[in-house]
Image (tube, rainbow, N blue to C red):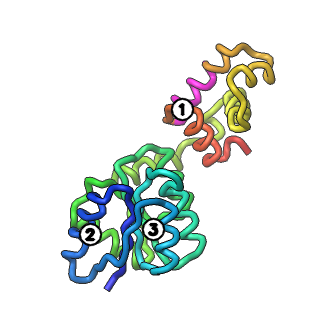
Amino acid sequence: MITVLLVDDHPVVRAGLRGMLEAEPDLTVVGEAGSGEEAVAVARALRPQVILMDLRMPGLDGAGATAKIVAEGGSAVVVLTTYETDTDILRAVEAGASGYLLKDASTLELADAVRAASRGETVLAPSVASKLVRSVRTPAKQALSAREREVLKLVGQGMTNADVGRALHISEATVKTHLARSFDKLGVSDRTAAVTKAISMGLLG
């Protein structure tokens, strides 16, 4: 029997997942958690074989909780979310998730993913796998210009656009242009995501 912990901040979602999984003869849900902090505590207490982890929750999010749980060992974490942006996927994978599925997965896909994760295998939704492959194939050093990397590095240090402009002796409008181009190249829509993605690609080291 494969033991499973469900982590989602919506009780209705957890109830639905429990119903789907417990209809399978070899799967049993041993616990639930409604936040990242609770997930870490419950995982530590119950040591489930597989954890289905929501990504976006108040407080400690799914990626943060995954990193803590994986660091302690013992449980395989499969992210189950409605989000499939490049940044979300990279954060989950870097945190040590064994898989990344979308919430529109069928009962069969979900059950098979839990079984595969319990065997130590990696499980990715097809669309997610494609995004990861594209991300890996992106020639990192060509993705951003030297100036775009400079701007993002300073943004990552907490500087405003005006601060960055003064530090690099360029106008604030030029800073915004560099950021807009960076967002487009990295496939993100905000400063935080751009910095996170650039760091994950090794561009700001």
Residue numbers of the magenta segment? 177-186
Q: Position of residue 104 (x, y in %)?
A: 26, 53
Numbered label attached to residue 99: none
Residue type indicated by callout 3: Val
Residue type indicated by callout 2: Arg
Residue under the point 74% across and 19% down: 165
101 vs 61, left or right, is: left
Task: Kindly report the distance in space between the C-alpha atoms of the residues bearing marks 2 and 3.
Answer: 16 Å
| Mark earlier in primary sequence (3, 1) | 3
Q: Residues within 10 Å of mark 1 (few under 14, many from 20)?
A: few
Residue nearer the viewer, 33 or 94: 33
Q: What residue is disc 1 on?
A: 190
| 4 relative to 185, above or below | below
Q: What residue is disc 2 on?
A: 18
Residue nearer the viewer, 202 or 115: 115
Q: What residue is disc 3 on?
A: 77
Q: Position of residue 83 (x, y in %)?
A: 38, 47
Whether residue 119 is in magenta: the answer is no
Disc nearest the viewer among 2 and 3: 2
For the N terminus, which image quadrant?
bottom left
Task: Kindly report the distance in space between the C-alpha atoms of the residues bearing marks 3 and 1.
Answer: 27 Å
Task: Provide the major secondary structure of the magenta segment.
Answer: helix
179 vs 156, left or right, is: left
Q: Is disc 2 in contact with disc 3, using a CB cutoff of under 8 Å?
A: no
Residue nearer the viewer, 102 or 38: 38
Where is residue 28, by image quadrant?
A: bottom left
Q: Position of residue 63 (x, y in %)?
A: 51, 57
163 vs 49, left or right, is: right
